[in-house]
Every structure is written in structure tokens, then in C-alpha cells.
Image (cartoon, rainbow, N blue to C red):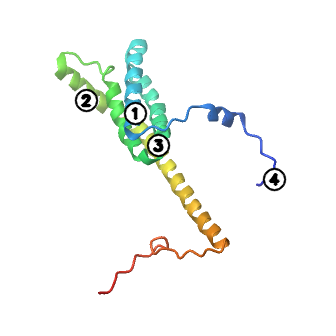
């Protein structure tokens, strides 16, 4: 549905509220560090407030996964589903409940990762889906820009001979 020229459609209040939220663009390593640091702080808060509740930790892991996937820059989208499970492992250290030195703590972390794998898979799935949808949207936008540029060039009277790769053909080999 189109609107008359010069008149903008009213924007919903929810959309206006979402536009006011921060929109950082983190590098791949920045997104991983963000997720790991936030999960560690949340796990410490969970340990202090809820005595290390795995359900609270898992529920808090899902929005951190989503924010990591939303805030990673487009060139590093593939890193979001990779860094999120690492952040889960870093965050589970304070609430794993290990005793008896390094070996006991390590066994507690491994056990906690195995027991709470559902939350781990869920957060990874959330990050993977968001990153995939973002990548597909970026690819479609790029394709639209390329088609629009080609149509504009043809309309301006500058016929461009499409390169073999742009036309979807393999380049010809030279005959010797």
C-alpha cells in the first residue's frame, strides 16, 4: 500500500521505542567478549541473589544470545553462533558449585555444561537464527541495489556489458 507523495505514515509507538535503543556494531571478538563478560556478571548476580539457579541463568542467557547476534557487525555475523556457547561456558563457572581445587571445579563445570545443554542449544539456536535472517536480508538488499544500479545505467543510455560472472556464466578460457 502506497502513501501519497509528501505524506508519511504514522509510526507505531513500539517502533519509536525500539529506534531509541542502542544499536552498536561489535566486531566478532567484541561480540564474544561482550557475551562472555555479561554472562559472567549475570552468573555472579545469579549466585548472589538466587543461589546459582540454573533456570535463571538459562533464561538470562537467551536474551544475551539475541543481543549478541543483533549487535555483531554484518561482516562478522558468522561469529555470533560461535561465541555464544563460549560465553555460556564462561558464565557457568561461578554457578557450577565445584569444590576441592582445580579438578573439582573443572568436573563441576563439565557436569553443569552437560546438564544444562538445553539452554546452551537454545541460546545458540537463537543466535544462529538471528544471524541467518540478518545475512539473508543483507544479501537481498545487495541484490536489489545491484539490480537497481543496472536498471538505472540502462535507462541513462549507458549500456553495460554484463561480466560473465554477473550473468551467472563461467568466464571463458583463452585458446592458445
Q: Position of residue 46 (x, y in %)?
A: 41, 18
Is label 2 in contact with label 1 (beta carbons under 8 Å)? no
> Mark 1 = which residue?
119
Among the two numbered marks 3 and 1 on one chain, the one whose residue lies closer to the N terminus: 3
Q: CA distance from mark 3 to mark 4?
A: 34 Å
Q: Residue at x 17, y 22 (%)?
A: 103
Q: Residues within 10 Å of mark 1 (few under 14, many from 20)?
A: many
Among the two numbered marks 1 and 4 on one chain, the one whose residue lies closer to the N terminus: 4
Placement of 106 over or under 28, stated as above or below: above
Label 1, secondary structure: give it: helix
Label 2, secondary structure: give it: helix
Quadrant of the drawing holding the C terminus? bottom left
Q: Position of residue 151 (x, y in %)?
A: 63, 69
Q: CA distance from mark 2 to mark 4?
A: 61 Å
> Mark 2 = which residue?
110
> Mark 3 = which residue?
73
Q: CA distance from mark 1 to mark 4?
A: 49 Å
Q: CA distance from mark 3 to mark 1?
A: 25 Å
> Mark 4 = which residue?
5
Between 151 and 42, the one nearer to me in the picture: 151
Q: Is residue 76 visible?
A: yes
Q: Residue at x 44, y 35 (%)?
A: 65
Amino acid at each position: 500500500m502506497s502513501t501519497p507523495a509528501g505524506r508519511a505514515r504514522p509510526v507505531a509507538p513500539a517502533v519509536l521505542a525500539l529506534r531509541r535503543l542502542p544499536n552498536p556494531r561489535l566486531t566478532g571478538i567484541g561480540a564474544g567478549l561482550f557475551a562472555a563478560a555479561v554472562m559472567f556478571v549475570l552468573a555472579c548476580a545469579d549466585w548472589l541473589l538466587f543461589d546459582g539457579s540454573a533456570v535463571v541463568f538459562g533464561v538470562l542467557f537467551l536474551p544475551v544470545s539475541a543481543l549478541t547476534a543483533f549487535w555483531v557487525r554484518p561482516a562478522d555475523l558468522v561469529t555470533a553462533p560461535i561465541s555464544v556457547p563460549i560465553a555460556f561456558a564462561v558464565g557457568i563457572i561461578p554457578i557450577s558449585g565445584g569444590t576441592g581445587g582445580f579438578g573439582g571445579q573443572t568436573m563441576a563445570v563439565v557436569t553443569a555444561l552437560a546438564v544444562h545443554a538445553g539452554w546452551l542449544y537454545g541460546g545458540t539456536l537463537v543466535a544462529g537464527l538471528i544471524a541467518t535472517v540478518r545475512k539473508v536480508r543483507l544479501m537481498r538488499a545487495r541484490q536489489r541495489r545491484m539490480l537497481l544500479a543496472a536498471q538505472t545505467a540502462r535507462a541513462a543510455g549507458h549500456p553495460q556489458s554484463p561480466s560473465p560472472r554477473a550473468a551467472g556464466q563461467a568466464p571463458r578460457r583463452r585458446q592458445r
